[in-house]
Structure formats: C-alpha cells, structure tokens
Amino acid sequence: MVVPGFAVYRPGRWLPLLYRPAFGAGLTERLRVWRARQLLHARGCRRTIMYLWRPEFARALDAFRPTIACYHIDDEYTFSEAERPLGESEARLIARVDQVIIHSPALLEKKGHLNSHTALIPNGVHYRAYAGQAAEPEDLRPIARPRIGYVGFIKEQLDIPLLLLLARRHAEWSFVLIGPSRLTGADATTFADLVRLPNVHWLGPKPVNALPAYTQQLDVCLMCYRMTDYTKYIYPLKLHEYLATGHPVVGSPIRSLLSFGDVITLARTPDEWSAALRQALTPAAGAPAAIAARRQVAQEHDWDHLVARIARTLCERLGPNDLSRFDAVAATTGVPAEHATESSRSPDQIDLHPPMLTTPKALRNISSNWFGLAVSIVVGLFLSPIILHKLGDDAFGLWVLVFSVTGYYGLFDLGIRSSIIKYVAKYAATRDYDRLTRLINTSLFSYTCLAVALLVLTGIGSSYIDRIFHIGPASVRTARLLFLMVGTALAVGFPLSVFSGVLQGLQNFHSMNLIQVAANLLRAVLIVVALDLGRGLLTVALITVVTPLLASGVYILIVRRLIPVTFSRQYIDRATWRQLINYGLITFMIIMAEQLRFQSDAMVIGIFLSASAITYF
C-alpha cells in the first residue's frame, strides 16, 4: 500500500542493467539516482535526504549532493571474503555522510567513532501483528506440545549441532523450525540428521504476513546462535517479535541480547540450555506478569516508535525549523515524545564523548601530580644511595652515562608527543572522532618507523660505545649490553607513548599519575630485592626499563576503554602527519634545549675522563 505523499520510483527498462565491468555498474547507479532526483525536482521537492543501506551504494553520492545523506548500518559486511574490501570503502562512506544510524551496540562500539553524528536505533517489531491472536496454521496443528520453535533463516550462524543434541536429549518436546535453509557443507549434513528426528518438524519458508501466526503458536522461542565474531554484531529481528507474543525466550549470550537478560534467558552450554528450556515450560514462566514484562519491552520497540526516532534524528540534522515541524506533527499523530527521541528500553548506549575537564577533575589531576612528584622524590632519595653502594663507582657511573646518551633519543620525537596532546584535546572536545582516529593511527605509524630507526642506531651505537667513551676493558661487554637494553626499551617506548599522550589530551592525568606511582614503587621494590640477592647492573637496568613498558600497557587498556579506537592503515595520512610536525617543531626546540642542559655534562665527562668520574660529579 502506498500512502498519500509517498511515491515509488522504478527505473523501468529504459536503462540496461550493467554490473560488469565495474564502471558499468557505477554508471548505471549514477544515472538511476540522477533520474530519481530529476523526478523529485519535477514534483517540487527542493531538499532531499539520501538514505543508504549498504556500502556499495556510496556511488549514489556522486550522482548529486543531497541536502543530507544518511547511512544505515544493519550488518557487518567485512567477515565475508567477497565483501572484505568493503571495510575501507565503508569507513570512507561513514565519514562522508551527514548522519549514521546503527542498529546494534557492538557495531556502535566498532564504528561509532567514525562519525560524530551517529545514533543507535535497534531493530523493532510490528507489535500489533505479533501480540494478537491469529488462527493456528493447519500444518502446526498435528505437532504435539510443548513446541520449542525457531522462526527465521536457517543459516550458518545458528548452532545446528546444539539443536541436534537438544532434540535427541529431549524427545518429549517438539522442535519446530520455520524458514528457508541456507546451510552448506557439514552444517547441511547435520541439519539433515536433525530434521530426520521424529520430534523435529521443519515447515520450510512461509510468507512474511503468516509468520506472526506461527510464532504465536509456539511455547518457547529460540535464538540459538553460535558465539562468533560475526554474531557479536547482529541484532536479531526476531527478538522483539518473540517478546511481543509474550512467550518465554531462550537465547545465546550474544552482545545484543545481554541488555535483555530480565525478559529472556541466556544459555551457553548444552546443560544450561536444557535447564533454561525446562524453566521456560514451567507455569511461572507463563505467568501474566512475565508475559506483560516481555510485551512491554516489545511495545517499546514497535516500528512506529523507531521510525519516529529515525525521522526525528534526520530532522535534527536538517535544522531547527524541520525539527520543530516534526515535533508538531508527532504531537498531532499521537507519537509520544519519549518514543520520538529515545526508547526507554533501548540497548545500553556507548558514551562516545569523553568528559571534558571539570573542577573536581582538575583538582584530582593537580593533587595526583603533587602526589606523584612526592613519591618520585622519596623513591629517588631512598634508591640512589642503595644502588651506588651496591653497584660501586664504575657500574653506577656507567649506568648514568648510558642513560644520559640514550636520553638524546628524545630528540627524535620531533615534538610529535606535544602535538598528540594538543589535538587529542581538540578533537575530543569537538567530537571529531574521524580526525581523532587518524591522529592516533598516524602517530603510531610515525613512532613505529622511528622505533625501527632507533633499533638500528642502538645496534650500531653498542658496537662503538667503548671507542667513544673511556670505559675499562672489564666493563666493555656490560656497557654494550646495557646500551642495547636501554636503547631497545626506549625505541619500543616511542609507539607506546602515543597512549600516554592520548590520556593527557583527555585530561586523565590522575589515572596516569597513579599508574606511574605504582610503577615507581614496584621498580624500587624489585631493585632492592635484586641487589640484596646479589644481582648486578644489568638486572637493575632491566627492571628500570621494563616497568615503564608495563605502565604503558595499562595506558593502552585505559585508552581503549575511554574511546573506541580503530587501528587500521587506512587512517594513516600525510595531512595529519604534517599537522603533527608543524606544531611539534615548536616544542622540539624546547626539548633540544632541555636535553643539552641536563644530559650533556655526563657525556662530556665520559668522553674526556672515565665512567667512575661521573659518579663523583
């Protein structure tokens, strides 16, 4: 049925279907979209919304520029070998459109940062159709109760071996499967074994308008998915269709179902599935209160409400006048305001906008800075005499010399770290997550290249260290190993430092300071224990260089929790690199001056005197 004001355009046969070669498909699509735009213009339409469903439709944006473009993500396409190249093109499409709508929480976590205008709007149900009571279909009547049923496509995402095990274990139940099979290979063989069981009834595909009647006549509804990377991203359309009937629902604990644990039962192992199905067949599971709770959730996800949310989201992007008009129309058509904005029972939202600096947060940062500084001073005053006493003048002087030389590695930073801090703060505040992702990926790539160069430099430098500095013959091997150890750790630390820079840009200093305090205390304890056990300079150095790397690992975990970062080479670009360097050159001059001021003295003494002389200095 076509409602007034709604027209469907079909291209007809005037334009041939060209799908090969690729330019033919692109030409066909552009001409069709251009023709549709001309028809809209002829009808008096001056503003258009282009609604895209799949990544390959991105070419439509090249035909003409709509007022706004919206991309609706309802699936993860990159798991198919045939569609894997869509990953990069989809990322470009997401960044290009004005609005993105995503239907599952896991997809939001993975792709929501690519466009700051991203809304989570889940799948829904035609509530009145499924909550009603249709006549029992004829092919269901001979099937004995209780009926444990699944309605939908029978494909590889279903755990067919689990169904086979349950059907064999519970011959007293009837298992009803409704939908076409798309299984191949071993799954098809297992499915054939399944449907041969006397208590399993595969009724095949049914018309869409007949599905509510079949679903209503089940006793327990199934969503037995395999736990895979693909099923993590799905949001089953049947979830709210099942709930609308009021029947008990048992499902696998995939990501999108976790938010509905109070109205459905989640099971992992075969024993848990058996127990859950038994519980679902008890009178308590069919109590009026339980049925009402399930139907309440389904009613909140009625398509009328969800479509209103989509429409309101698009009107927000069009502008305040359109939003006001929508709210006025919604009020006259009886769509409640709370449903037009956000469902009261939508899946858990992902906060893509890290909190900016507030007064309590500033106080935490300041106090943690002072606390961290105090701990560092105390640890230094306590640890330095112990190290000097245990290692001796020569070893301690060698320690200071190597750390002074490798301290110049900081010059290779070129001020990139300061750029990271600045632009992370900027992009997080403006919620520009596309640029933030590019910044992090480009910084990681730059630092990784730098780390490789420093590893080569470290290898060369370790061979010549005894020729540059006055080091006794007995200490040459130790000096070379020490230089290799410290230089390698510093080189590896460059890429890892991106994440501490991100935390600073997000004003999360208190977390960094507490981690640094823990690392300093751990380092001090391990060094004291190692020296008491008679270990030497290399062990102390190993502890000293490893503890910061452990702290960096914790920084990575915190960053991944605060912002959903995607790591991919497609986000590495020259423009971002130039931006990093242009700003960083200013701070690079400051870094160079600081290095010359604080690190040169030990090097000069090491060149003209001896390592032990550095200790007395």
Image (cartoon, grey):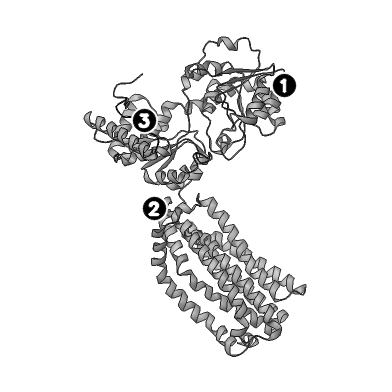
Label 3, on which residue?
17
Q: Residue at x 48, y 42 (%)?
A: 108
Label 2, on which residue?
430
Label 1, on which residue?
170
- Check the image and report above or below for 77 versus 501: above
Q: CA gap, disc 3 to disc 2?
A: 44 Å
Q: Residue at x 54, y 28 (%)?
A: 239
The amino acid type of the residue labelled 1 equals His
Across and down, in percent, residue 520 comes to: 63, 67
Secondary structure of residue under mark 1: loop
**In the picture, residue 546 is in which quadrant?**
bottom right
Across and down, in percent, residue 132 comes to: 50, 16
User: Mark 1 packing: few (<14 Cα in 10 Å), some, or many (20+)?
Assistant: few
The amino acid type of the residue labelled 3 equals Leu
Q: Residue at x 43, y 44 (%)?
A: 89
**In which quadrant will I find the N terminus?**
top left
User: Mark 2 packing: few (<14 Cα in 10 Å), some, or many (20+)?
Assistant: few
Q: Are marks 1 and 3 in contact (CB under 8 Å)?
A: no
Secondary structure of residue under mark 3: loop
The amino acid type of the residue labelled 2 equals Thr
- Check the image and report above or below for 88 versus 443: above
Q: Residue at x 24, y 35 (%)?
A: 46
**In the picture, residue 9 is in which quadrant?**
top left
Q: Earlier in the sequence, mark 1 or mark 3?
A: 3
Viewer-nearest of discs 1 and 2: 1
